[in-house]
Amino acid sequence: MAVDDYEELLKYYDLYETIGAGGFAKVKLARHILTGEKVAVKIMDKTSLGDDLPRVKTEIEAMKNLSHQHVCRLYHVIETSKKIFMILEYCPGGELFDYIIAKDRLMEDEARIFFRQIVSAVAYVHSRGYAHRDLKPENLLIDEDQNLKLIDFGLCAKPKVCS
């Protein structure tokens, strides 16, 4: 971890352990220095992104335009010459996938609540002109109030409207 790459981020946030990883990014728990709020920091190396850099730009643009109680919030983006840091809402309950595995199955009442939240998030995303295109339990996080948050807009698209 080259300090230069992280210098701008560390002005605002204390970084902690890795809480997730994907094909293009690692996600670390962090705390905003001034407010003490826990956040998730998605860290992407620009050089390893290569041809996928435009996809990341689309993800950031989508998340900047989306504000809904069941869509993970993007608070801040810090871009350096080598890194992109996305500062996101922290959801301590982890992935819906792991939650379902740990419980073996969901009771109907709980499943109904989660399903309504998923439909609400997807309907909102569609109303804003986006398609998520990667809806799966791994891309739904559980916040501190047991509500779902849709994440990972890396494959999203904003289809052009035909007239």
Image: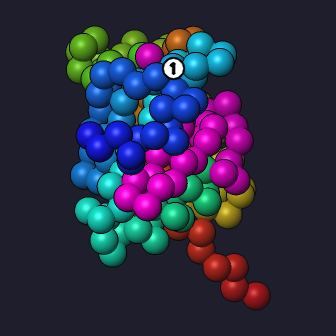
Task: Please tell me in which quadrant of the rendered image residue 60 appears.
Answer: bottom right
Seen from the viewer's position, the closer of residues 109 and 141 is 141
Residue at position x 52%, y 42% in the image? 8
Q: Is residue 103 above or below residue 97?
A: above
* 75 is within the stretch colored magenta: yes
118 sits to left or right of 47: right
Element carrying mark 1: strand
Q: Is residue 133 above or below residue 162?
A: above
Q: Is residue 159 visible?
A: yes
Q: Horizontal and vertical percent for residue 148? A: 52, 27
122 sits to left or right of 132: right
Q: Is residue 111 visible?
A: no
Q: Is residue 46 above or below residue 162?
A: above
Seen from the viewer's position, the closer of residues 100 and 4 is 4
Number of residue marks: 1
Magenta region, residue range: 64-92
What is the three-letter code of the residue carrying label 1? Arg
Q: Horizontal and vertical percent for residue 20? A: 30, 32
Residue at position x 45%, y 35% in the image? 41
> Residue under circle 1?
31
- Colouring chosen for the image of the structure: rainbow
19 sits to left or right of 121: left
